[in-house]
Amino acid sequence: MLDLDISEFFDEDGPLATAMPGYKPRPSQVELSQAIGDAIQDRATLVAEAGTGIGKTWAYLVPAFIHGGKVLISTGTRTLQDQLFARDLPRVRAALAAPVTAALLKGRGNYVCHYHLERLQGDERALKRATAAILRRCPKTPTSGSA
């Protein structure tokens, strides 16, 4: 199935429509997907901007799946990243019956560096300063109760 032309994946009777009830083809989605496919094939750089609601996620997942290789997809928010990884990627992978593996990476600010943590454990003052710095960067949450 992965040997179809990119536009055929998005047809009214294509694999995406067959696997996803309510799917409707969008010309701008197909155009974006073809441009992405061409850039992958030509090993070129593509800068594309598309408005809300054209289906950007599927537009880049389809050519990424059919061309194979490693692809890095970066999102602007964790919410969008979660949606892409937990919902969109599995849906498109199933619709295309694509043997694709994926990994989710959530920015270096979300992990503890074991080396630095071990270094800090021997220095209580440094550990307190590091903990305070981390807490200052955390978003403030409203407190409950009366004033």
Image (cartoon, rainbow, N blue to C red):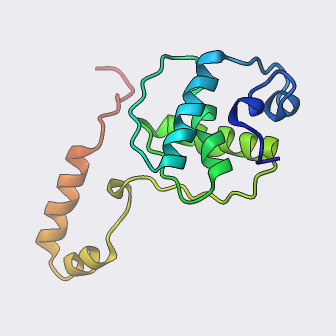
Q: Is residue 71 depicted above or below 58 in this figure? A: below
Q: Is residue 79 depicted above or below 1 in this figure? A: above
Q: Which residue is located at x 71 percent, y 29 percent?
A: 7
The image shows a total of numbered marks equal to 0
Residue at the outermost front position: 42
Q: Quadrant of residue 46?
A: top left
Q: Nearer the viewer, residue 56 or 124?
A: 56
Q: Is residue 135 left or right of residue 55?
A: left
Residue 134 in percent (x, y) is at: 24, 53
Residue 24 in percent (x, y) is at: 76, 17
Q: Which residue is located at x 79 percent, y 44 percent?
A: 96
Q: Nearer the viewer, residue 52 or 14?
A: 14
Q: Is residue 99 left or right of residue 73?
A: right
Q: Is residue 81 depicted above or below 116 in this figure? A: above
Q: Quadrant of residue 59?
A: top right
Q: Is residue 13 left or right of residue 121?
A: right
Q: Which residue is located at x 48 percent, y 52 percent?
A: 72
In which quadrant will I find the C terminus? Answer: top left
Residue 10 in percent (x, y) is at: 74, 28
Residue 41 in percent (x, y) is at: 54, 48
Q: Which residue is located at x 33 percent, y 76 percent?
A: 114
Q: Nearer the viewer, residue 57 or 141?
A: 57
